[in-house]
Image: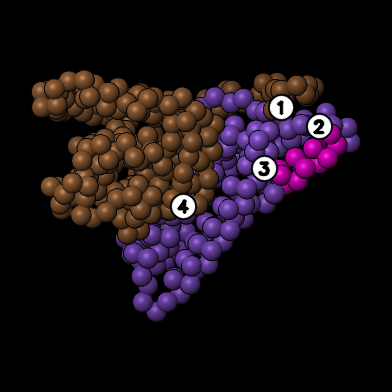
Chain colours: A purple, B brown
Amino acid sequence: MEVGQMQRQWVDYTKSLFLEGLLDGQFLQLQQLQDESNPDFVVEVVSLFFDDSEKLLNDITRALEQPSVDFKKIGAHVHQFKGSSSSVGAQRVKNGCIAFRNFCEEQNIDGCVRCLQQLKQEYYLVKNKLKTLFAMEQQIVAAGGSIPMLEISF
Amino acid sequence: MGMPADSQFHVLAVDDSLIDRKLIERLLKTSSYQVTTVDSGSKALEFLGFYEDDQSNPDSPSVSSNNQQEVDVNLIITDYCMPGMTGYDLLRKIKESSSLKNIPVVIMSSENVPSRINRCLEEGAEEFFLKPVRLSDLNRLRPHIIKTKSKDQNQEIHDEQTSQKSESSEIKQEQQERVHHLHQQLQQSPPPNSNKRKTMEEGLSPDRTRPRYSGITTVV
C-alpha cells in the first residue's frame, strides 16, 4: 500500500474514533504535544493509561466482591480512573466513571456491578482502537511517511 | 536578583498521578519552562527547603525575607486532590512560610466546585485550572511570574513598611477582581460534552491536515 493511502486511512480511522465519541479534544492536545524531540509522547502516555486502567479495574472488581463492600474505596478508584481517562481523552470511559461514581454515592451494589461491566467494555474497546491506530502509525513511519496532523477546533 | 531569561523560569509541578505529571511536564516544557515534577506535597516542600519551624519560629534569624531568593522556583503548580497533603494544604503551608510565600501558586483540579475554587483563591492561589490542563491555560502563568518578580524589585526600592502596607491592600483588591474574573470564565466555559461535539464535527475534515514535521511534505 502506498504511503498516501495509508495516511488517508489513518485520517479516516482517527476521525471515526472522534465521531463515535471514544476520544475527545484532549487526545488532540496530546498529539499537539508530540514533536521531533518527543516522537513517542502519545504512545508513552497512553501506555501509562493502559497500565493504570487495568490495575484500577482489577482493584475495583476485587473490592466489589468483598462481603462488605467499601464504597468509599471504590469511589476513590473510580475518581482516579475518571482523572486518567479524561487526561488522555478517553471520553466514553470518563463518562462511564461519572455514572459509576453516582452509584457509589448511593451505595448501590447492583448499579456498581453493571457500571463496572460497562466500564470494562468501554475501556477494552478504546484500548483496541488505540492499538490499531498506533499500529497504523508505525506502518506509515516504516514506509517513510509522517503522521498527518489533524486540526480540529474545540 | 536579576530577571532570568524566559526559558529559565522554573516551575515546580506537584501531582500524584504519573500520567498527569507527564502531561504537565510536557505542557510546561513546550511553553519553554524549566520543570521539576514531584508526586506529593511533602516532596514539594522538601524540594523547596521548607522546614516546619519556618513558621513556628518567626523570630529565628534563619527566616529573613531574603531567604526566598535562595529558592530557585518561580511558580508552583499543584493538583488539588492528593492523598496525604492536598494541594490546598500545600498552598497554606507555602503562604504561611515567610521564605516561600511570594512564590505564586496555581491549583489544578478536575472538579469544578466553586467553594473549593474560592477557598484556594482566598488562601492566596493565583489561578485555578480545571483539568485536563491545556496549552492555552499556560499563557496565564507568565504574568504571575513577572508580577512577582517586579514586586520583589519594588520592595527593595520602597521604604519597606509603606510598601508592604500599600501592597497588602492592593493584593486584596487584585484578589477580589481575580475571583470575579475566574468565576466568569468558569461560568462561560461550556459544560463538558455539550458544544464540543458539534464544533468538532464541523471542524473535523481530512482536508484540514498538515504534515506533523516541518520540512517533510505529505500529500494526503
**Which chain is home to disc 4?**
B
Identify the secondary structure beneath mark 2: loop
Comes first in the chain, label 1 or label 4: 4
Identify the secondary structure beneath mark 3: loop
**Which chain is home to disc 2?**
A
Q: Residue at x 31, y 55 (%)?
A: B85
Q: Residue at x 84, y 34 (%)?
A: A144
Q: Is residue A116 above or below residue B108?
A: below
Identify the secondary structure beneath mark 1: loop
Q: A139 or A67: which is nearer to us?
A: A139
Tell me how far mark 2 sits from mark 3, CA to CA. Answer: 15 Å
**Which chain is home to disc 3?**
A
Residue that mark 2 sits on: A145
4 and 3 marks on the same chain? no
Tell me how far mark 3 sits from mark 1, CA to CA. Answer: 14 Å
**Labelled disc at residue B17:** 4
What's the magenta bit mostly, secondary-structure-wise?
Answer: helix
